[in-house]
Amino acid sequence: MQENKIILNNQPLELLNGNLSSLSSKLYEYIKLRKNAIEINAEGMHYRDLNYLIKSISKTPKKIILRNISGQRYIGTKLCENVIMEIYGTPGNDLGSFMDGAEITVNGNVQDGCGNTMNRGCIMIKGSAGDILGYSMRGGKIFVRDDVGYRVGIHMKEYKENRPCIVVGGTTGDFLGEYMAGGILVILGLNLEKEKIHNIKYVGTGMHGGVIYIHGEVTHTGKEVEMKSLDESDKILLKGLVMEYCKYFNIINSNEIIKREFSKLIPVSTRPYGDLYAY
């Protein structure tokens, strides 16, 4: 390997060890330079090697393009705000876990645990997502164009201005918002049939904070939540999130979505299991 620096945006790219000498020639062959971006072909690549390459690129503002992704785990772990990532393929579990300000766009589906304990940033998924999306999410936003799996938003929490948010275009699996302590879940139900019923159970089980906005009928909820109508502040909040969703996925009928009827699920108590503990 003859070069020991990569130049991007007229600046030398800073690596973990200051240059590329720590990268094996095998890993270096996966990298291609594009205009104002670094492209990595991840075909057949072990997830540890892929994540090492991603983490090796630090501090310098950049765009990273990942192609031929096929189940590699932990992509984008702890990525900070100076990174914009575009993924082609299907990332494995825990995409964007502990993410702290980066922006990730996935051109495809994602597997389980996307946004696990995410702090800040935004993930846009042009497809569907698996189970436990946004597990213990503490901030940032996740937008999913289509459907999601089970236990979405489980243990989400908020603190002061840090209020995590997940917007789903389709429908969801059971246990939506389970043990949710804060944040916002929005289920747009754009793919519901005429009866407009979500075939889901145990919505809001154990929920003791946050709010769920949902279009379409929900027939089975946890005893810890109650259904309410939206007030004006809810409508303003929901409108902004719908506009963002439509912008990311190039949907032109945002006004039609906003005019749909939504319900609000909120917890009955902030301590639903308080009587189970000794004082």
Image (cartoon, rainbow, N blue to C red):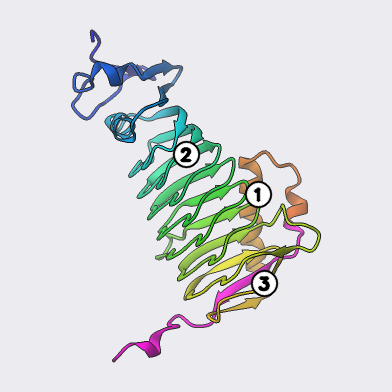
Locate the N terminus by quadrant: top left
Q: CA distance from mark 3 to mark 1?
A: 18 Å
Secondary element type, mark 2: strand
Q: Which residues are magenta?
A: 258-279
Percent across and percent down for residue 167 are 58, 54
User: Considering the numbered disc 3 on the image, is that residue within a helix, a strand or a loop?
Assistant: loop
Q: Amino acid at mark 1?
A: Met
Label 1, label 2: how far apart the Cα atoms are: 19 Å
> Which residue shows up at 77% across the image and 57% down it?
193
Residue 210 on the magenta span: no
Residue farthest toward the right in the current orientation of the protein: 194
Q: Quadrant of residue 172?
A: bottom right
Rendering quarter of residue 181: bottom left
At label 3, which amino acid type do we have? Asp
Depth check: give the residue in front, 184 or 237: 184
Q: Compared to 187, does 12 lie above or below?
A: above
Query: Earlier along the polypeptide chain: callout 3 or callout 1?
Result: 3
Residue 219 position in % (x across, y down)? 67, 73
Q: Residue furthest top?
A: 2
Magenta span contains residue 264: yes
Return the residue at label 2: 104
Q: Residue furthest front?
A: 44
**Badge 2: few (under 14), some or many (20 or more) residues near its Cα, within 10 Å?**
many
- Quarter containing the C terminus: bottom left
Residue with the mark numbered 1: 243
Callout 3 crowding tier (Cα within 10 Å): few <14, some 14–19, many ≥20? few
Q: Are marks 3 and 1 in contact (CB under 8 Å)?
A: no
Q: Nearer the viewer, mark 1 or mark 2?
A: 2
Q: Residue at point 42% right, 82% down?
A: 271
Q: Is tag 3's residue or tag 2's residue first in the polypeptide sequence? A: 2
Name the residue that disc number 3 marks. 231
- Is residue 111 or residue 38 the one in the foreground? 111
